[in-house]
Every structure is written in C-alpha cells, then in structure tokens.
Amino acid sequence: MAYHGAGIARTAEGKVVFVEGAIAGDMVRPLELQSLPQYDKCVSHELMEPSAARVPAPCSYARECGGCPWQAMSYEEQLRWKRGFVVDALERIGKVANSNELVAACEPSPSKWHYRNKVELDVFRQKGKFCLGLHKKNSHEHIALEECLLLPQAQRQLPAHLAGALNYSLKEEQDKLVRVALRSSRTTGSSELALYMLPSGVNRSLLVKTLNNSRAFNSLVRVIVEDGKLVERKVKKVEVLDGAGYWHEELAGNHLKISAPSFFQPNSAVAEAMIAHLVRTVDQLSLGKDSPVADLYCGAGTFTLPLAKRFRKVYAIESYGSSIRDLRRNLEEVGLSARVEAIGGDVARELATLEPLTLAVVDPPRSGLKPEARRALLEARPEHLIYVSCNPVTMARDLGNLCKEYEILSVAPFDQFPQSYHVETMTVLRVKNCPHRPARSVKPNGAGSSEELHNQQ
C-alpha cells in the first residue's frame, strides 16, 4: 500500500503502478491506465480476486467519496499498514536504522465508525440544488451526502437536513457560505454548528429559528473569513448567533471550551489515549516537578493541562489567536493559570527567549516544523522531546534532522482516523550525552483507561 491510500503493483519491467481503490492482495484487471515517466496510475479496474483482507464497505458512498478510502480493508490490516508507514518513513526519509525495533504496534481507536467529534462539509450546487458534502475520490467534483458514518450516530443524517435548512434560511446569501463545520461531544452532549461565510448580512432570526428546528445546537456561530481558501483559516471574526459560542468537551478529566476556528483532536477517545501515553512517559522519565517544560504549538491545551498538573512551570506557545484565547480560558477554569505562561507567538522566535528546558512537547501542523523552528529546537536543546505528528513523512524529515543531537527512545502510533491511511504518532527523544540522567527506554504504547489516567493525575 502507498501512504496516500492506493495499492501498489509493478509491471514486468519493474515500473511502479499505483492502483486506486485496490488493497494489498487484490488481483485486478486494469481498465484505465495513465502512463507517467516515473510511474503509472491505474485509475479504474475490475476486481478479479479479492484480498483476504478485503471486507464489505458499509458506506453507500464508498465507491465515490474520498473521505474513507480504506473502509474495504479489515481494521487489523489498516493498523498493520499504518505502523508500516511510520517504520518506512523513518527508515527511508529519517535514515533511522533501528526504526522497526523502535515503533510499537498501532494503538486502535475504540470506535471504528462515528468517531469524529468534528466534520467539515463543503457547500456547492448540484443540478441547481443546494448541497452539503465532500470531494469525490481524486477529483475536484463533489458528492452530496444524505448521511455520514463518521458523524456520531445521532447526527449521521444531519447533512441532508442542514442542506435544506440553509437553502431556505440563507436565501440570497447562499453564495457567501463556503463551509459548514459540525462538532459534537459524546461525553458532554455539547454540539456546535459553525457557518464559515464571506462578509455579508444575514437574517439572523430566520437563520437561528430554521437551524434549531433542524436540530437543537448548544452553539450556533458564524465565522467570517476573508476568502474561500479555508486551508489558511484567515478568520476576521466569530459572530455568536445563538447559544454558548463555543463547543464543550471533557478530555482526561479536563473540561475544555473550544472556539469554532480553533484546532482540536478530532477523535476524543484516541486523544485521551495519547494523553495517557504522555503522562506515563513523563512519569518514566522521572522529571522533577520544578523542571521547566514547554508545550509548543499547544493549541487550546490538550497537552498543556496534563503537563500543568505535573509541573510548576509550563511555557505554552501558540501562534493562532483563537487557540491561545481558548487555552487561557481553559487554564482559568481548572485553576492552573499560575503554572502556565501562555505565549501567543511564533515558536521559533519565542523558544529562543525561554530558560533551559527539561522537556518540550512539540505538536506542529501537518506540514511539520519549519526550518527555523527545527534550528531553534536544536539550539534550545531541551533534555527530552516528545514529538507529536499526524504525517509520517514530515515527522521523519524532522526527526532525521533532530537526531543530530537526539536519540529516539520510542515511537508510538495511534489510529486517530480509522478507515483512512492517516496515522498519528508520538515519538520520545532524549538529548545525546545528557549529563543529568542515564538513558532509559520508555514503555511504548498502551492506551490506558480514563480511570487510570485520572488516578495518575
């Protein structure tokens, strides 16, 4: 399997062929081939003999939608390949010779479906009809969704209901709506609907009434963006239409309030497993309570709060304004503000101003660390690093660079996104020739229960 989800075959001459929609072990007959200089692409095929790992896909959109490309693969096989991607990236890109020994088994998600606490839907018109949905596989075209199996069970049919409600209530402002985001918590029951819109006026009372008739939300907000390019998240302001104005989640005993533009781990159960692993790692490293630690790219506090319960001085750095405001609010609510210096700014610049660190937790965006951030980390030289990543490729690149000064103790993959090729990892590193403590292995993986985590904290 290729990291981006396709099956890999080879011609008799040895040329690589990426087979869209195939899984390892399938026997297929190519129907449409695209020949490129370095490789070929099989964009459609006939399945002649299924792999032993192939299972029936439960979603009615499986053939078209690109959201869950691996749902025809058994879950055990998904976990095996995800670990393999991490091992391969470390060996091939990071040049880590003993990666197979370092990487633990991939921690499974407790739920294989209905696991996402957030789903974002594109807005488009299809045959003159206002629709919500996702992109088709390998295409700029869209597929209108009547339901989505990634949403919580009670909300799975919400896309169709919302499309009708928004079509009616927005009227001439429909072309100003660029995306719809749904958030829902299993633990608190909190739910939020965020409408990402270009600057425009709306009939607020009609919008609120119509949407609440479709489904009652704890929070309805309108996020005003500068343009339709949501990858950059150029948010001008957040307007509370109705309710709390934030989404409420409980994670590892901490109550978190999250604003619509702020990033938050989309699989809460796996996020708890990652927090448990972080806590065990810190315990096994035997760091003193007065040790200065940092949480870099800290977001709204997923890892900052557990760290603040164990250390008296935590530096939390985040450049995104919405997230740093959420972090400060969350720290105040749990009484940990005195232990945390929340710094809004660039990691590379702010890291250079900190005192020598015993530990730094680093959770960069999917693109990984910028060169200046990698240089700043190497110059700061914390005794220990815990590097969190959702992209094995950029993770391996960064770790290959950091291993000039650090040795890897363990790599723990977590399945944050079942039915897809994406994998989350948490890597523990120790600075080479550290005079303070002998090197020791960190117990890899193991999710631990919420009760265990609460007792530890």
Image: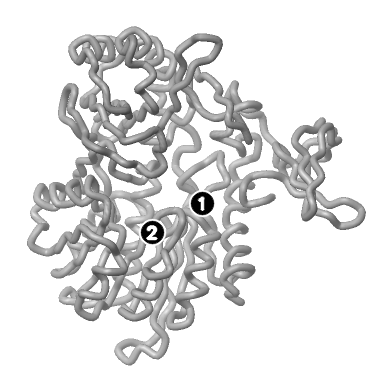
Q: Which residue is mark 2?
A: 364
Q: Crowdedness of circle 2 by 10 Å Cα count: few (<14), some, many (20+)? A: many
Vertical order, 51 against 405 (above or below): above
Q: Nearer the viewer, residue 129 or 279?
A: 129
Badge 2 or badge 1: first in the primary sequence = 2
Q: Is residue 456 visible?
A: no
How many numbered marks have been drawn onto this rendered protein structure? 2
Query: In the drawing, does residue 405 fall left or right of residue 223?
Result: right
The quadrant the C terminus occupies is bottom left
Q: Residue at x 26, y 22 (%)?
A: 200
Check disc 1 and report the residue beneath it. Answer: 423
Q: Compare residues 205 and 291 and report the one nearer the observer.
A: 205
Whether residue 227 is visible, yes or no, is yes
Is residue 75 rendered to the left or right of residue 377?
right
Horizontal and vertical percent position of residue 433: 40, 90
**Residue occupying image coordinates x 25% and y 22%:** 217
Residue at the spot 32% in from the left edge and 28% down from the top edge:
198
Residue at 32% x, 27% y: name it: 197
Position in image of residue 176 (x %, y %):
35, 22
- Disc 1 residue type? Val
Q: Amino acid at mark 2?
A: Pro
74 vs 148, left or right, is right
